Amino acid sequence: MTMRGVGMAVARTSRWAPSVLSAASMVITFRSYERNIKQRWRAVSRGVSGRRNKLLEALTVAGREHSNAAVMYHGAMGERLGLGMTEEKTLDLLQRLGPLTAGEIAQHTGLAPATVSGLIDRLEGKWLVRRVRDTKDRRRVIVEINYERLAGFSELFEPFVVALSQLYERYTDDELELILDWLNRSAALQREATQGLIEE
């Protein structure tokens, strides 16, 4: 029996039918997505050497594993900090770039302005950030980190930061420049993809 058939059969006999049908639909959608990805890879790989084709496939798998590992790590970290993942990454953005306006946060994250406004409200409600007037332009309202509230948070990240530093030692400067270039380019592509999802 097909997945759709299983879903229909359960629908006739179970009060949990909507949930089961939803799960079945997700499985079917995911399998369709997998087929589409494989078809695209086959199209791209035409005329490509066998070695490069294997490398591209391995990069796809490794990229998904890396993404999953990052999501799980930041999810676990967010639970320890009492933050949602978007909240945690916005704090990271403010730490790296300094105080930003809501519009600038939206630009860097790819999130919709209304989403960013609610995000800032939540962070402000937890005393992690504050809205202040820009001293250079009083018409601008910027969001800055409340570093007193963040005291001690960095200790949670330290083991991973140390591990990454040790990993970097395995690579030459030229190799690190190549890795940096790929990370910057892939991050830009992901921001574009995020914006595309928001605009749909």
Image (cartoon, rainbow, N blue to C red):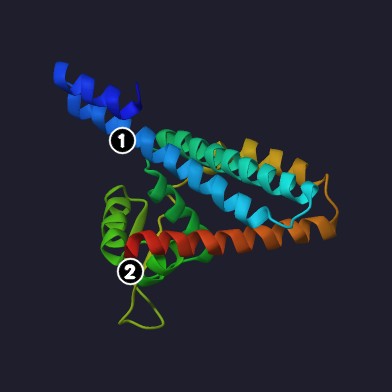
Residue at figure coordinates x 60%, y 41% from the top left? 66
Residue at figure coordinates x 42%, y 59% from the top left? 194
* Residue 133 position within the rendered picture, expressed as x and y whole percent measured from the top left: 33, 74
Q: Secondary structure at mark 1?
A: helix
**With 182 as the anchor, is 19 left or right in this view?**
left
- Dot 1 or dot 2: first in sequence order is 1
Residue wearing tag 1: 25
Say if residue 14 shows up in the picture.
no
- Given the image, on which type of amino acid does mark 2 rest? Val
52 or 77, which lies in front?
Answer: 52
Q: Quadrant of the N terminus?
A: top left
* Residue 185 position within the rendered picture, expressed as x and y whole percent measured from the top left: 62, 63
Q: Residues within 10 Å of mark 2 (few under 14, many from 20)?
A: some
186 or 106, which lies in front?
Answer: 186
Residue wearing tag 2: 132
**With 115 as the anchor, is 78 left or right in this view?**
right
